[in-house]
Image (tube, rainbow, N blue to C red):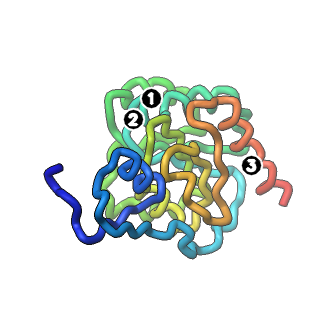
């Protein structure tokens, strides 16, 4: 009501456009939805160990606890997990990782230092269980040539890059299968 109906609304995803239109927001506005099928570089070549990256808030709604639970079920002899972020679960995440040589915790990292971390990893794991729209971390990871393993939530499902693998939000079994299939395909060519 505060915005009335501007001439044009630019939405980063069809998901967000539908969300507002179903609630009768901006009913007289022209809608433009950004195209998520951008052309991203080819995925980087991968060598073992396969390096998976989590970037985000260390909070339950971002799925870090689901990722940790999934990681416990994996055979990690050819996998590493790199975790970048801060939040209320940082201490418990560090405690969990303490005796795991294959897990590296960075904590909060300045944005201008992230390119080196992206370049050192092979795939981004995006386990969010909340409704996401257009996560910048996925765009940045794709721009750096990483493959994406992501929870299919909100606008995330609209990404159409060749190297995105989806699983249902909060589904540890599916996340494990996606990680294992991704790893097997890389190792076996």
Measured from the top left, where is residue 150 in percent x and y?
58, 47
Which residue is most to the front? Answer: 28
Residue 38 at what x, y percent from top left? 54, 72
Neighbour tally class for label 2: few under 14, some 14-19, many 20 plus, Cα within 10 Å = many
Q: Position of residue 44 (x, y in %)?
A: 64, 67
Question: What residue did someone put label 2 on?
Answer: 58
Q: Mark 1 or mark 2, which is nearer the start of the sequence?
A: 2
Whether residues under marks 2 and 1 lie with C-beta atoms below 8 angstroms apart, the answer is yes
Q: Are marks 2 and 3 in contact (CB under 8 Å)?
A: no
Mark 3 / mark 1, whichever is N-terminal: 1
Q: Nearer the viewer, residue 36 or 86?
A: 36
C-alpha gap between disc 3 and disc 1: 23 Å
As measured in the structure, the alpha-carbon distance from the residue carrying label 2 to the one carrying label 1 is 8 Å
Residue corresponding to mark 3: 183
Q: Vertically, is 175 above or below 165?
A: above
Q: Give left or right: position of 16 versus 124.
A: left
Find residue 189 and report its horizontal and vertical position in percent.
84, 61
- Tag 3 secondary structure: helix
Residue identified by numbered label 1: 93
Which mark is drawn over residue 104?
none
Mark 2 vs mark 1: in front: 2
Q: Nearer the viewer, residue 108 or 43?
A: 43
Residue drawn at x 37%, y 62% as measured from the top left: 11
Residue 148 to residue 10: above or below: above
For mark 3, does the 10 Å Cα neighbourhood hold few (<14), some (14 to 19), or many (20 or more) residues? many
- Which is nearer the eye, 142 or 17? 17
């Amino acid at each position: 009501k505060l915005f009335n109906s501007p001439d044009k609304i630019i939405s980063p995803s069809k998901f967000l456009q539908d969300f507002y239109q179903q609630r009768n927001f901006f009913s007289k506005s022209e809608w433009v939805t950004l195209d998520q099928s951008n052309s991203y570089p080819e995925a980087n070549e991968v060598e073992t160990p396969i390096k998976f990256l989590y970037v985000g808030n260390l909070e339950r709604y971002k799925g870090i606890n689901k990722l940790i639970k999934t990681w416990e079920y994996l055979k990690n002899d050819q996998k590493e997990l790199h975790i970048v972020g801060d939040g209320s679960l940082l201490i418990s995440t560090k405690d969990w990782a303490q005796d795991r040589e294959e897990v590296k915790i960075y904590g909060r990292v300045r944005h201008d230092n992230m390119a080196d971390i992206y370049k050192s990893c092979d795939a981004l794991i995006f386990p969010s269980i909340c409704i996401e729209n257009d996560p910048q971390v996925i765009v940045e990871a794709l721009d750096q040539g990483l493959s994406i393993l992501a929870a299919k939530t909100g606008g995330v499902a609209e990404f159409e890059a060749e190297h995105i693998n989806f699983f249902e939000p909060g589904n540890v079994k599916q996340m494990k299968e996606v990680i294992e299939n991704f790893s097997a395909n890389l190792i076996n060519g």
